[in-house]
Amino acid sequence: MMVVPQSQATSNESRLELDKNKKNYINTLTLSKRLSDRYAGHHALKNIFYPETCRLRDKFKQMCETLLLDDPIDYGLKIIDLLWRKAAYEPIQIFKRYRQEYDETTIVEIEIMYRMHLLSVFGYYSNLLIKFVSMIKPYRNMNHFFDFIQLFNENKSVNLTTTTKIENLVESLLKVIHKCLVCLGDISRYLSEYDGCIQTAEKYYTMAVLLDPEIGMPLNQLGTLCGRSNSSCDAAFFYLLCLSAVHPFDGAKDNLQMLFERNEKRFLELSKQQTKNRNDKTRFVEFIDRIF
């Protein structure tokens, strides 16, 4: 009987694993295009919550999760961004864009499905975050950073043979964990439009900043979360921090510009109002002076 060397057997297994992941990636892209077709057109708002579309979206999320957990090094950033766009962000934007086109009765029903979508995505990303933290735990202690109870196997790890591969894995996992935190912050911000609670979104954005201060995106999101509080000074502070980061988010510049233009307009309105008030006072004094 011919004995296959262990190194050759390992190499064959690795090749098969790579082929499987590549095939899964292609299938994921195909499913993503099918979702894009569902999201297109004038009736996109109704289409995004049809049972068939929901099933496609659930299948897409499962395929993305499998690929992320099997090969975070090669597919982590590619898939985590695609996952956010197709499974969460695009349905949210479609709802916001087309909601005004429907009557009150219809939009109430759609809004219920929209809020269920937000809660579903929040739960999905929370679960995904725990799994990623479980994967990184053998190589990086995150107990000081995450306060949730460990629900998955604490000894779960990826079979790696070199220090370089371990470093690449840790780097990739930290990036997808950071992305999950920002996504959870975004979903919490959308939910705050209904419950008024911004603390959850603030928590996840702040965790993302602490995990990687060089990335400006969560700082921009904190600025958006602040809105017009304190005459938009808080928002301006975070936008400026974002633009000062090593990897700034370009959209922060436009956000800051709009903020300045809005405040300038308000300043001019107040100046005109003060001038009008002074003129009224002057006329009143002149009137009193004439009487007496």
Image (cartoon, grey):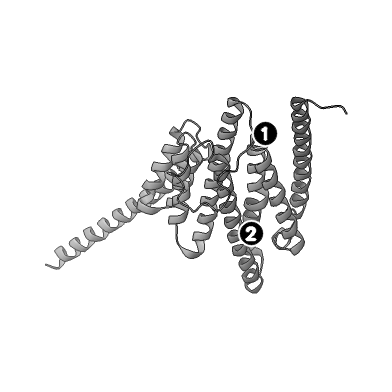
Q: Secondary structure at mark 1?
A: helix
Residue lying farthest to the bottom in this orientation? 105
Instruction: Give residue 158's position: percent from left, percent from top.
Output: 63, 37
Instruction: Give residue 196's position: percent from left, percent from top.
Output: 45, 62
Q: Secondary structure at mark 2?
A: helix
Identified at 63% across, 59% down, the residue is 95
Instruction: Give residue 72's position: percent from left, percent from top.
Output: 64, 38
Task: Name the amino acid type tagged 1.
Answer: Asp
Q: Residues within 10 Å of mark 2 (few under 14, many from 20)?
A: some
Q: Which mark sits nearer the N-terminus, 1 or 2? A: 1
Residue 258 is at least partly visible in this image? no
- From the viewer's side, name the closer residue of 252 and 127: 127
Say if mark 1 contacts mark 2, CB within 8 Å. Answer: no
Q: In the image, is 254 to the left or to the right of 24?
A: left
Query: Residue 97 is drawn in which quadrant?
Result: bottom right
Task: Name the amino acid type tagged 2.
Answer: Phe
Residue 172 is at least partly visible in this image? yes
* Quadrant including the N terminus: top right
Residue lying farthest to the left in this orientation? 292
- From the viewer's side, name the closer residue of 95 and 62: 62
Instruction: Give residue 173's position: percent from left, percent from top.
Output: 57, 38
- Does residue 144 sit above or below 162 in this rendering? below
Residue where numbered disc 1 is placed: 74
Q: In the image, is 18 to the left or to the right of 248?
A: right
Q: In the image, is 142 to the left or to the right of 289?
A: right
Identified at 59% across, 35% down, the residue is 172
- From the viewer's side, name the closer residue of 48 and 81: 81
Q: Of the numbered discs in the image, which one, if any, rests on residue 95?
A: 2
Q: In the image, is 18 to the left or to the right of 118?
A: right
